Image (spheres, helix red, strand yellow):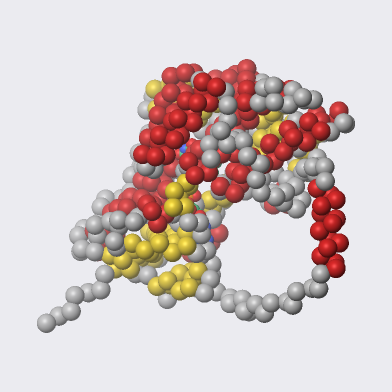
Amino acid sequence: MTEAAPPLRIVILGAGFGGLEAARALAHAPVEVTLVDRHNHHLFQPLLYQVATAALSPGDIAWPVRSIFRRQRNLRVVMAEVTGLDLAARCVRAGELDLPYDALVVATGATHSYFGRDDWAPVAPGLKAIEDATDIRRRLLLAFERAEITADAEERRRLLTFVVVGGGPTGVELAGAMVELARHAMPREFRRIDPAQARVVLIEAGPRILPTFPEELGEVARRSLERMGVQVLTGTRVTDCTPTGVQCGEERIAASTIVWAAGVVASPVGGWLGTERDRAGRVRVGPDLAVPGHAEVFAVGDLAAVTDAKGRPVPGNAPAAKQMGRYVGRLLAARAVGQAPPPPFAYRHHGDLATIGRRSAVVSLDGMRLTGLIGWLFWGVAHVWYLIGFRSRVVVSFEWLWSYLTFQRGARLITGREPAGGNATPMPGERQAAALGTRVAERLPAAAPRELPAPRRVAAGG
Ligand SMILES: Cc1cc2nc3c(=O)[nH]c(=O)nc-3n(C[C@H](O)[C@H](O)[C@H](O)COP(=O)(O)OP(=O)(O)OC[C@H]3O[C@@H](n4cnc5c(N)ncnc54)[C@H](O)[C@@H]3O)c2cc1C
């Protein structure tokens, strides 16, 4: 009697949009799936800016990966940071953990790029993870608190100036939500400042905002933002970000809060594949999304450089990542049962959406253009539809309805600590508390240094 072949071991790196869809497409295949992510949750990044501006709470837009896959018996979740790949031995390294595979799906996404100026990161955080959103929320809300107590008029002006760098959809959404927070969400709450006097500046190096949208929609967005009170500066390049503001050539904008929404670079895991990448670090893949020279390794989502049937680059967005993940999942499911693979990957572009603020959004959909209230309603329904689970859909819809009716923001909590190198002046007592902490620490006996295991070098891509 011949023994049945062991099931194909498939390791998926990243539980973002691409990784999740790949895993789901393998639900009924005779395979063993291991889904690895450094976080325990899947995050709906399109609504992250609403956490950063206190409209939603983190739990409204993120879900534990284990709970999403609790019913998928052929899948196990591993929460770990991927630290290396051994393509020759077909093994993923995640710290001390080795994860052997027969097929590998790399879906570790992208992160913000400072175009070689990573030293700007502490003063101009980008928006990618929950921690980034709550950090930006803290900076924003603290700026109002500090402005309320400072006696220095110039410092007050600086504290109430917020700069968003990058006029893509994330920058536009952030700037709109910030000005709404300042002008509508906290009336009558402060005694010495008027939050409505806050200045929000959106800076874009290119000639127009929303460059991936049709030109007329970019113009609609610009006019809407300006009506709301956002100062839009196009054709303006940021040359320096410091704790006290941004420099744009000769012009200096004194600001307390700077948010970076300007550039994107693929996750470093792509570099460990050792194959050709584009300027943004994305891995060039074949028509079946396999990495050249490795028919068993696939790259999907923001990490992959893919072109559509007309030779145009597939955009780095959630629908593209989902389509790629689903495609590779189906391909591997077919491979597991010896079926013919599906035809080459073909991307379907559904449209572009960006919200600007209350009753204002721009939507470009298969030749159809929606703006204003209709666009905003469409944007809202589309985003609620793609949230995971009934609870999130109800909670987010309720939060939106509530803020629409009352202008209030439900998640205005200042949490966490000021990171080193941030741009904030300390709150009263902070300096004394820090000094006291140092003095107490000086008096305490120093803790014995812990023996740490020597770091193991992993030959990336080896
Ligand atoms: C603020 C923001 C707003 C956006 N708005 C929109 C929008 O409105 N519409 C739209 O279509 N798209 C939007 N996008 C883009 C969209 O979110 C991405 O295109 C999409 O998330 C890409 O999916 P992905 O699976 O490739 O990567 P991701 O969804 O980023 O997932 C990557 C996963 O890999 C994990 N990971 C990374 N490195 C490691 C490692 N070394 N070890 C373990 N795990 C790792 C991460 O934790 C993450 O869970 C937005 C993105 C951002 C940041």
Q: Nearer the viewer, residue 258 or 62?
A: 62
Q: Classify the position of the N terminus by image quarter.
A: bottom left
Residue at the image position 80 percent from the left and 29 percent from the top = 157
Q: Position of residue 450 (x, y in %)?
A: 69, 77
Q: Is residue 138 left or right of residue 402?
A: right
Q: Is residue 444 left or right of residue 98?
A: right
Identify the image quadrant of residue 389.
Answer: top left
Q: Position of residue 348 (x, y in %)?
A: 35, 39
Is residue 303 visible to the viewer in this orientation of the structure? no
Q: Nearer the viewer, residue 294 or 119?
A: 119
Residue at the image position 80 percent from the left and 48 percent from the top = 430
Q: Is residue 79 left or right of residue 32?
A: right
Q: Position of residue 184 (x, y in %)?
A: 63, 22
Q: Is residue 173 left or right of residue 350?
A: right
Residue at the image position 39 percent from the left and 43 percent from the top = 388
Q: Position of residue 144 (x, y in %)?
A: 73, 33
Is residue 17 visible to the viewer in this orientation of the structure? yes
Is residue 34 placed above or below 380 in the rendered structure?
A: below
Q: Nearer the viewer, residue 118 or 65?
A: 65
Residue at the image position 83 percent from the left and 63 percent from the top = 440
